[in-house]
Amino acid sequence: QYFTTMAANDLRDPLQAMIAESERFEREFAATTDPACRAYRRTVRRRASYMMTLLDGMLAYSLVQPDGLRFRPVEMTGVVEDVLETLSGEIAAAEARIEVGALPTVHGDRPRLIQVIQNLTTNALKFADDAPPRIRFSGGEENDHWRIEVADQGIGIDPAFHEQIFLPLRRFRRQGDPNACGLGLTICRRIVEQHGGRIWVSSAPGEGATLTFTISKPAIGAG
C-alpha cells in the first residue's frame, strides 16, 4: 500500500503538467485544420487523462484495506439517497428514472458501502442503451446475509464476461468513455468481501444487468 500511494503521488505532478500543456496546445492551435495534428492533440490529452484516472483508481484500490473499517448499523436506504444526491447532475443529464424499493439495515462500514453503491450506479448510468436509463435498487434477507441489488435496463453483458468484469483493469467500456480505468467493480468486490459477502452479475446482451451483492450478518453477540 505504501509503495502504491507514493508512486501514485509522485506520478501525479508530471501527469498534471502534461495534461495542462496538452490543453494549452489545443487552445493555441485550435484553428489548425490539419487532420493529423488535430488527431495528435486529442490522443495526447486522452492518454494523459486516462493515466491520471488509472492512478486515482490504483490509489483508491490500495486504500481499501480491512484496517480501520468501522462496522455499525447502516440503513441502505440512506446510503442510496446520499449516492443519488451526489450523482444528481449525471442523473438529470441522462434523464434517468430511479426506483428505490425496500432496503435492509445492515452491519457494515458506511463510507465503503457508499463507495460500492456509487460505483454500481455510475456503471448503470454509463452502460444505458439509447433510451433514458432506468435503475432500481432493492434488497432483502437471506439466512445469514443481507442482499442488495442494483438493476438496470441497459446494454447488458455477455455471460462470457460475467467473471472478468470484476478483475483489475478489464475495461468493458462504451465508445466515448476513454477514461474508464477498469477498477470500479474490482474495488466493489474487495469491499463486499471485507463485509463477508460476495458480488455477482446477472445479465445478457440487450437485457440489462443486475448487480447483486451480499453482506454477512454479525454473529450473535458481536458488536
Image: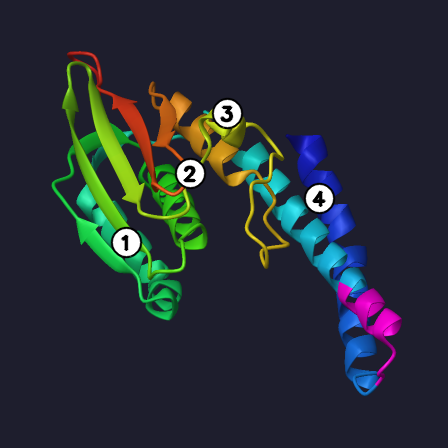
The amino acid on which the numbered mark 3 sits, given as a three-letter code, is: Ala
Task: Identify residue type, mark 2.
Answer: Pro
217 or 70, which is in the foreground? Answer: 217
Which SS type dominates the magenta stretch?
A: helix
The tag earlier along the polypeptide, 2 or 4, is 4
- Give the residues in magenta: 32-42
Report the residue marked by disc 1.
134
Mark 4: amino acid: Ala
Q: Residues within 10 Å of mark 3 (few under 14, many from 20)?
A: few
Residue bearing mark 4: 8
Q: Which structural element holds mark 3?
A: helix
- In the image, residue 172 lies in the stretch drawn in magenta: no
Which mark is on residue 23? none
Q: Quadrant of residue 147?
A: top left
Identify residue for label 3.
160
Which residue lies under the disc numbered 2?
205
Q: What whole-number distance in Å separates the C-alpha atoms at marks 3 and 2?
A: 11 Å
